[in-house]
Amino acid sequence: MTWLRRAALLLALASAACTTGGTGARDAQPRARRSGDVITEAEIRAGQWSDAYAMIAALRSGWLRTPGPESILGETDQVQVYLNDVRLGGLATLRGLAVNDIARVQRVRPVDAAARWGPGHSNGAIVVTTRAAAR
């Protein structure tokens, strides 16, 4: 068997294993996939944090970073925070939110945030949904 045929055979076997999900015991249990844009209630309940800011800093620290100036004047929009779709303000408002009441936290990308809430969202938004609103 030539090296080219061996390579083709290995590629075919690898492709088949990927599409069938593998056969190992580890693959028998479904793995929870962590979304980059959502913090689930299970993730929230798995830890203990003093406030929503500390929780997000631990689980998705990238959400809290504000890139450099977005305008010619050197101004930078803050990431906007919403609680049950009501605008609270910038990231500092997360420090006043108790984690016990939170059911879900979602990061909304800048384009989607601007389409949903209008201008002033060049760094996106963080939407906090409480347990009461999630019902």
Image (spheres, helix red, strand yellow):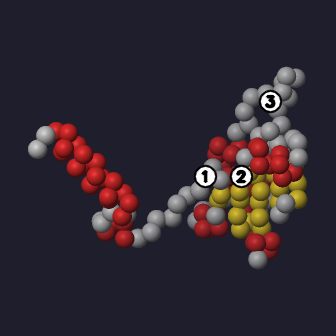
Q: Residue at x 82, y 43 (%)?
A: 121
Q: Residue at x 73, y 47 (%)?
A: 109
Question: Which image quarter holds the N terminus?
Answer: top left
Instruction: Check contact, mark 1 vs mark 3: CB within 8 A.
Output: no
C-alpha separation, residue under disc 3 versus residue under disc 2: 19 Å
The amino acid type found where label 2 is placed reads: Arg
Q: Secondary structure at mark 1?
A: loop
Judge the density around disc 2: few (<14), some (14-19), many (≥20) Cα neighbours within 10 Å. many
Judge the density around disc 3: few (<14), some (14-19), many (≥20) Cα neighbours within 10 Å. few
Residue 91 drawn at (x, y percent): 79, 46
Question: Which image quarter holds the C terminus?
Answer: bottom right
Q: Which residue is mark 3?
A: 70
Instruction: Check contact, mark 1 vs mark 2: CB within 8 A.
Output: yes
Q: Which residue is mark 2?
A: 107
User: Is 5 positioned to the left or the right of 58 in the image?
Assistant: left
The amino acid type found where label 1 is placed reads: Gly
Q: Residue at x 87, y 41 (%)?
A: 120
Q: Earlier in the sequence, mark 1 or mark 2?
A: 1
The circle on residue 36 is 1
Front residue (pair 33, 22): 22
Q: Secondary structure at mark 2?
A: strand
C-alpha separation, residue under disc 1 versus residue under disc 2: 8 Å
The amino acid type found where label 3 is placed reads: Glu
